[in-house]
Amino acid sequence: MALDGVNILKELLINHEYRIRGYSEFKVYEPKERVIKAGAFVDKIVQHSLCDNVLLPKLASVFIRNNFAGQIGKGTLFGLETLKKDMYDAYTIHGMNIYILKADVTKFFYNIDHEILKKLVAEQFDDDGIRWLCNLIIDSTDGKGLPLGNQTSQVFALLYLNGLDHYITETLGIQYYGRYMDDFYLIHQDKEYLKYCLKKITEYVEHLQLSLNGKTQIMPFKNGIKFLGFHTYIRDGKVVCKIRNENKRNAVRKYKKMAKLVVEGKLSREKFIECYTSWKAHASHGDCDGLIYNLDEQIEKILRGENE
């Protein structure tokens, strides 16, 4: 954006005359079907600055450590490594006589209540200008929910369940807990206490106009947990982490298809290598050497133009 444009945008923000320009809408199908609403370029600039310079610096000290998503130095790898440590530490103390409560919020982004969110923002920020801008972005879509394409939506979603994080770790006293956006786990040696926790958590999220979905359950520790695309469990006193079968199938199908697009000239080799290398780095954290080796061979054959 040119300097004159930046100065004009600055004046609009100072005078509270800035307005959201609307969204273009499209669907993505990986890892599941979702509706994405993408904002205009200028709106992305505003949100990028708001998140990086105001929201995240302040909220970093408000969020618990084990709130994994959308923050520098965190993410899926951080969440996976924390889960591994939590499981091993719990196992070291209690053996296999432990239970896991795995919970998931139903259509989280689509059900975030605007008025509740604006109150949560107001509790953290006393600057009228910041409140005005946040409220403007929150109400840029009608009804409930936040646009999945907005950078601010990621931060607002972290804040929306921040109170739940503190409630679980402080009021309920759960030591082994982690959350990645709307997906979270509790590990405890007392199954009855986890049932009580589930009841209280259900009540808590209902106050936020949310609900837990049918996948929420309490499982024996020996079964492990499916979290962040991996199945993590204890075997022979060691933590084992395997990429989930459905994710394996999806990855093989996706990257073989992309390799064929490279051969057909519909996708650049550089872009394909970038995407495929990123996935391999992610998969390598889940004891997937065999899967990666076999897929590498299949990809190389396709790129050489050989029949499978």
Image (spheres, rainbow, N blue to C red):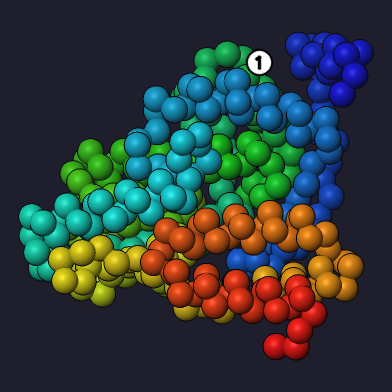
Amino acid of disc 1:
Gly
Viewer-nearest residue: 234 or 128: 234
Q: Residue at x 31, y 38 (%)?
A: 166
Viewer-nearest residue: 145 or 225: 225
Is 18 on the left or on the right of 218, as rendered?
right
- In the rendered view, tell whether residue 185 sits above or below residue 224: above
Q: Residues within 10 Å of mark 1 (few under 14, many from 20)?
A: some
Q: Position of residue 183 (x, y in %)?
A: 43, 57
Question: In this view of the protein, can residue 72 be seen by the observer?
Answer: yes
Check disc 1 and report its element: helix, strand or loop: helix
- In the rendered view, tell whether residue 34 sits above or below residue 50: below
The residue under label 1 is 129
Q: Quadrant for the N terminus, please.
A: top right
Question: In this view of the protein, can residue 160 be seen by the observer?
Answer: no
Q: Position of residue 144 (x, y in %)?
A: 63, 49
Q: Position of residue 186 (x, y in %)?
A: 27, 56
Viewer-nearest residue: 122 or 237: 237
Q: Residue at x 47, y 78 (%)?
A: 245
Q: Residue at x 67, y 74 (%)?
A: 299
- In the rendered view, tell whether residue 96 sits above or below residue 307: above
- In the rendered view, tell whether residue 141 sits above or below residue 246: above
Q: Position of residue 167 (x, y in %)?
A: 29, 41
Is 144 on the left or on the right of 304, as rendered?
left
Is 148 on the left or on the right of 246, as rendered?
right
Q: Quadrant for the C terminus, please.
A: bottom right
**Badge count:** 1
Q: Residue at x 63, y 49 (%)?
A: 145
